[in-house]
């Protein structure tokens, strides 16, 4: 299971986000769109043993990511 989002502020793209349940492999499509459009990207995973970087793509634990969000 996965979901993809693009956050936007004042009509400007801010971040590409891909959310996964368990697949810890960095998403090829997320890498593609990150490089094509130059938008920061993050993949967040519920069942992730260790956070890491895959090139310029962050692969993060979902709870840690959500705790850092500013509302």
Image: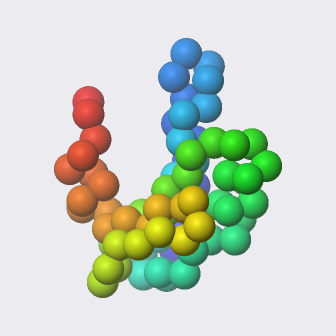
Q: Relative to the observer, which residue lies in front, 21 or 17?
A: 17
Q: In this view, does 24 lie to the left or right of 35?
A: left
Residue lying farthest to the top in this orientation: 10
Image quarter (top left, top right, bottom left or bottom right) of the C terminus = top left
**Residue located at (68% from left, 62% from top):** 31
Q: Position of residue 11 (x, y in %)?
A: 62, 19
Q: Which of 41 and 45 is in front in this view?
A: 41
How is colour applied across the structure in the image?
rainbow
Instruction: Give the camera-side residue of 27 and 58.
Output: 58
In terms of image quadrants, where is residue 59? bottom left
Name the residue furthest left: 67
- Kindly indicate the quadrant of the structure image that contains residue 60: bottom left
Residue 29, visible in the rendered structure:
yes
Q: Which residue is located at x 63 percent, y 42 percent?
A: 39
Q: For the point 41% across and 72% down, which residue is it?
A: 52
Vertical position of residue 39 compared to residue 4: above or below: above
Q: Is residue 37 left or right of residue 49?
A: right
Q: As drawn, which residue projects farthest toward the right?
A: 36
Task: Give the number of callouts.
Answer: 0
**In the image, what residue occupies the spot 73% across and 53% down?**
35
Q: How far from the left and from the top, in percent, is residue 32?
A: 75, 60
Q: Can residue 45 be seen in this view?
A: no
Q: In this view, does 49 lie above or below 44?
A: below
Q: Residue 34: horizontal and vertical position, in percent?
A: 67, 52
């Amino acid at each position: 299971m996965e979901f993809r989002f693009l956050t936007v502020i004042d009509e400007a793209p801010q971040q590409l986000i891909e959310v996964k349940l368990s697949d810890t492999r960095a998403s090829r499509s997320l890498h593609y769109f990150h490089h094509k459009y130059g938008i920061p990207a993050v993949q967040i995973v519920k069942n992730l043993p260790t956070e890491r970087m895959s090139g310029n793509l962050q692969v993060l634990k979902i709870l840690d990511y959500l705790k850092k969000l500013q509302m």
